Image: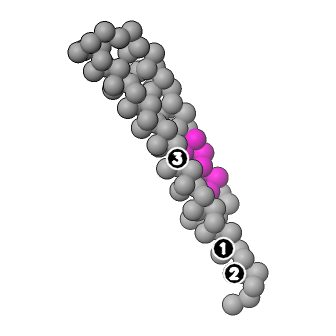
Amino acid sequence: MPVKKKVGEFGGSFVKQISALMTAAFGLVAALAWNGAIQAIFKEAFGTSSEVVPMLVYAIVVTGIAVVVMVLIAYFSNKIGAK
């Protein structure tokens, strides 16, 4: 197998793994945002808190951004050739 082909395969594999790690990282950020929002809801229901609406808005915005970034990562990963 020529060296150039091996390097190309490594590059494709590298891009695929980086995309998977970045996607997981953004998923974690969205999960943490929802965690805070849910905690605020429980605080509101069972105690006093004025943070529910901002935390929900934050969780929704972060989730939206994470979804957009994940779609872009998948798009560019596929465009580069790491299928």
Q: How much space separates mark 1 and mark 2, taking CA atoms?
A: 6 Å
Q: Quadrant of residue 53?
A: top left
Q: Amino acid at mark 2?
A: Lys
* Mark 1, secondary structure of its residue: helix
Is 77 situated above or below 53? Answer: below
Q: Amino acid at mark 1?
A: Phe
Residue 63 relative to residue 15: left or right: left
Q: Amino acid at mark 3?
A: Ala
Is 47 situated above or below 18? Answer: above
Q: Quadrant of residue 17?
A: bottom right
Residue named by callout 2: 6
Looking at the image, which residue is at 65% across and 57% down? 79
Q: Is residue 74 visible?
A: no
Residue named by callout 3: 25
Residue 40 relative to residue 30: left or right: left
Magenta part mainly helix, strand or loop? Answer: helix
Q: Are marks 1 and 2 in contact (CB under 8 Å)?
A: yes
Residue named by callout 1: 10
* Mark 2, secondary structure of its residue: helix
Q: How much space separates mark 2 and mark 3, taking CA atoms?
A: 28 Å
Count the labels in the image.
Answer: 3
Residue 9 position in % (x across, y down): 65, 75
Question: Please, which residue is most extreme toward the left here?
Answer: 46
- Tell me the quarter of the image containing the N terminus: bottom right
Q: Which residues are magenta?
A: 69-77
Other residues around mark 1 within 10 Å, as few (<14) / some (14–19) / many (≥20): few
Q: How much space separates mark 1 and mark 3, taking CA atoms?
A: 22 Å
Other residues around mark 2 within 10 Å, as few (<14) / some (14–19) / many (≥20): few
